Image (cartoon, rainbow, N blue to C red):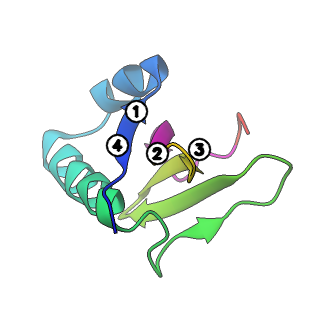
Amino acid sequence: MSKYSVIFKPSVEKDLRKIPVAVVDRLFQRIDGLTADPFPPQSLKLAGGELFYRIRVGDYRIVYQVDTEDKQIVIQYIRHRRDVYRDL
């Protein structure tokens, strides 16, 4: 199985500035794990028309899309659980 590449939306940088550094390290470890398996058992497909998935890291959520044809993962949001679903 080939690895997927990860693309971050420009808004993710702004999201990461609000998150403690210790949590950011854990988030990037989880994102690195997505490159090998974009659909781990912990991921859930979000309801709605778009193909969004989310993965939980403590109180934070990584919301992403998977393009299986181009082998790309697009990180949409990384936010606290109370805020992440407001913009979807």
Q: Residue at x 54, y 48 (%)?
A: 63
Disc 3 versus disc 4: distance between alpha carbons?
23 Å
Contact (CB < 8 A) between labels 1 and 4? yes
Kindly identify the amino acid type of the residue bearing the numbered disc 2. Ile
Q: Quadrant of residue 29?
A: bottom left
Q: Residues within 10 Å of mark 4 (few under 14, many from 20)?
A: some
Disc 3 versus disc 2: distance between alpha carbons?
18 Å
Contact (CB < 8 A) between labels 1 and 2? yes
Kindly identify the amino acid type of the residue bearing the numbered disc 3. Val
Q: Regarding mark 4 in the picture, which secondary structure is present there?
A: strand
Which is more foreground, mark 3 or mark 4?
4
Q: Residues within 10 Å of mark 2 (few under 14, many from 20)?
A: many
Q: Residues within 10 Å of mark 3 (few under 14, many from 20)?
A: some
Q: Nearer the viewer, residue 10 or 7?
A: 7
Q: Position of residue 42 (x, y in %)?
A: 47, 77
Q: Nearer the viewer, residue 79 or 63?
A: 63
Q: Residue at x 39, y 20 (%)?
A: 14
State the mark number for residue 7: 1
Q: Which residue is mark 2?
A: 73
Q: Residue at x 59, y 42 (%)?
A: 83
Q: Regarding mark 2 in the picture, which secondary structure is present there?
A: strand
**Magenta segment:** 73-85
**First reached walking from the N terminus: tag 3 or tag 1:** 1
The quadrant the N terminus occupies is bottom left
- Along the horizontal axis of the image, is 84 left or right of 33? right
Q: Regarding mark 1 in the picture, which secondary structure is present there?
A: strand
Which is more foreground, mark 3 or mark 2?
2
State the mark number for residue 47: none
Q: Nearer the viewer, residue 57 or 73?
A: 73
